[in-house]
Amino acid sequence: MARRKSDRMQQIERMALYPLDWLEERSGLIGGVRYFLFRKVPGDTSWWHTLGSATLTAFLVQLATGVILAMYYKPDVNSAHESVQHITNDVWAGWLVRGMHRWGASVFIILMFMHMGRVFLFGAYKYPRELNWIVGVLLLATGLFEGLTGYLLPYDQTAYWATVVAININGTAPFVGPFLASLLRGGAEIGPDTLARFYSLHMLLVPGALLGLIGLHLYLVVRLGVSSPPWSPEAAGGQPEPEPPPARSGLVQPRPRAGVRGRPE
Ligand code: HEM
């Protein structure tokens, strides 16, 4: 009876796992995800090493909330502000989704800086991880640009004047400044073309670039492995510690005592 029951359990298990087996046989995706999630990391990794994953989580929250906001937002100078008010006041849980996206943007940037600080202070940018540091710098610049383009979208006084300041700062760059400012504005004045431009950048180009860069960043993390903290013998640039001498059995080494009868002096 017990045997028949376990056979039945096995059958149910096989049925439940069938879709996963089907996918694995045709794509190897399950094995890839398992490799990513269960790969080996140094034994002395600590909470500091979770900052990268925290940044990734903040980015994914921004993606999810951003997609929901885009279902209600109207990228037009006459209706942008009203559509944001409508999301906040009328749409079910709209205030929550908008709040998560607005505050989440700061959380994402702060976590990115904290993660970068951890990498710098732990010396994790050294050989062989220099390329991943460079990808990280691109991620930082792209992440900041995502914040800038999103700031204009509510199209209120704060958004408008903050964008005026940001574009004017860019305009002061040597040689390329005026070109950069006009490219961002989409003309001589901030107006409908600027909003359309910022919306397209914020929704399509910049998130796409972030996704590509994060993919490359994580590929390099998996390929190179996570580095040990600086106090570890295996830290980047460090030498492995020599093997400790074998433990002694007591305070003194047992050996023949001098002057004992029957033993050599
Ligand atoms: C969207 C932003 C970012 C995400 C999602 C992200 C994600 C991650 C993750 C998950 C890890 C592995 C775990 C860890 O070490 O924390 C990592 C490692 C690393 N990240 Fe980032 N990162 C981002 C931005 C940056 C920035 C701005 C830099 C530096 C400029 C950077 C440089 C590095 C380096 C060098 C490593 C390897 C560290 C090691 O092996 O110990 N990352 N990143």
Image (cartoon, grey):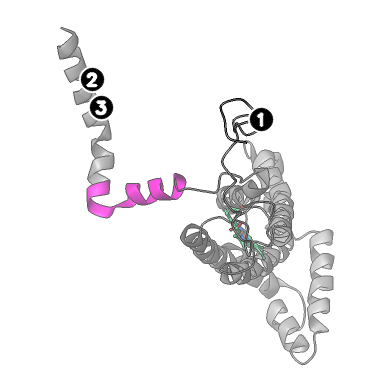
User: As drawn, is 37 to the left or to the right of 12?
Assistant: right
Front-most of residues 70 and 61? 61
Q: Residues within 10 Å of mark 2 (few under 14, many from 20)?
A: few
Q: Is 234 on the left-hand or right-hand side of 191?
A: left
Q: Farthest bottom residue? A: 175
Q: Where, quadrant-wise, is the N terminus in this rendering?
A: top left
Kind of residue at disc 3: Glu
Question: Compared with residue 70, is residue 97 higher up or lower down, i.e. above or below?
Answer: above
Name the chief secondary structure element in magenta.
helix
Residue under the image location 21 percent in, 24 percent down:
10
Mark drawn on residue 29:
none
- Which image quadrant: the C terminus? top right
- Residue in view at x 68 percent, y 53 percent: 108
**What amino acid type is highlighted by mark number 2?**
Met
Image: 259 above or below 194:
above
Marked residue nearer the N-terminal end (3 or 1): 3
Q: CA distance from mark 2 to mark 1?
A: 76 Å
Point out the quarter of the image occupied by ligand 1. Answer: bottom right
Dot 3: element: helix
Front position among marks 3 and 1: 1
- Report the residue marked by disc 1: 259
Q: Vertically, is 175 above or below 156? A: below
Q: Which residue is mark 3?
A: 13
